[in-house]
Image: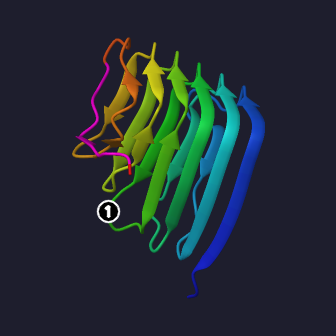
């Protein structure tokens, strides 16, 4: 089958008051098998979503790809601000989150993936858990994130220099 590519731009939006305690939420990126989605999100307010503010999920898909850049977004008062779930064998995915805030969520960011999402110049504070890395999931910092003031902060697995 041919790989289908979809490109999405989300800019200057508010996504709020969606989902229930058992599922749903603000924004779901869930490409089909043999499909890839490139998503660029800039200037977004994502708040008060019952399950997740944003979920990137390729579970159970083959040759699926999710290529995401988030710039200047605020995730607040969601159950989980941002969930990244893209396990080994589901395809190639990448995520870069810059200039964003995660506050007053149960989980600010939850990572369950084999690739290392990149984080730069973000503030993750005031959450029950700031950064949750499931299993051996990695998360890379550019060294300029503010991760503190959460009940449990969590930690990035590596730091790389800006170039």
Look at the image and say whether residue 21 sits in the magenta stretch. no
> Which secondary structure lies at badge 1?
loop
Q: Is residue 159 magenta?
A: yes
Residue 151, image x and y in percent? 34, 11
Residue 162 vs 151, above or below: the answer is: below
Residue 154 percent across, percent down from the top left: 29, 26
Q: In the image shown, does 25 or 96 lie closer to the viewer?
A: 96
* Above or below: residue 147 compared with residue 33: above
Where's the N terminus, which quadrant?
A: bottom right
Quadrant of res 127: top left
Question: In this view of the protein, can residue 43 be seen by the observer?
Answer: yes
Residue 103 in the figure: left or right of residue 6: left
Residue segment shown in magenta: 153-162
From the image, give the main secondary structure of the stretch colored magenta: loop
Q: Residue at x 57, y 26 (%)?
A: 21
Residue sitting nearer the eye, 150 or 22: 150
Quarter of the image where one finds residue 101:
top right
Pick out the residue farthest to the front.
163
Q: Nearer the viewer, residue 34 or 120?
A: 120
Residue at 56% over, 31% down: 51
* Residue 59 in sight in this render: no
Compared across the picture, whether 143 is left or right of 8 comes to: left
6 relative position to 81: left or right: right
Q: Looking at the picture, does residue 41 appear above or below residue 103?
A: below
State the residue at coordinates (64%, 27%): 49
Label 1: few (<14), some or many (≥20) within 10 Å? few
Residue found at x 54% / y 44%: 55
Q: For this view, does 75 lie left or right of residue 60?
A: right
Which residue is denoted by mark 1 in the rendering?
88
């Amino acid at each position: 089958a041919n790989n289908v590519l979809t490109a999405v731009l989300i800019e200057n939006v508010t996504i709020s008051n969606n989902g229930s305690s058992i599922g749903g939420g603000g924004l779901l990126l869930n490409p089909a098998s043999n499909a890839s989605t490139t998503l660029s999100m800039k200037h977004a307010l994502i708040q008060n979503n019952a399950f997740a503010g944003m979920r990137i999920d390729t579970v159970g898909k083959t040759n699926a790809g999710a290529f995401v850049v988030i710039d200047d977004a605020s995730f607040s008062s969601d159950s989980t601000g941002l969930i990244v779930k893209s396990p080994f064998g589901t395809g190639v995915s990448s995520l870069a989150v810059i200039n964003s805030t995660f506050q007053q969520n149960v989980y600010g960011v939850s990572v369950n993936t084999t690739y290392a999402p990149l984080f730069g110049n973000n503030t993750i504070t005031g959450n029950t858990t700031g950064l949750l890395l499931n299993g051996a999931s990695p998360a890379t910092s550019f060294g300029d994130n503010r991760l503190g003031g959460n009940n449990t902060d969590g930690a990035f697995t590596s730091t790389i220099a800006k170039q």
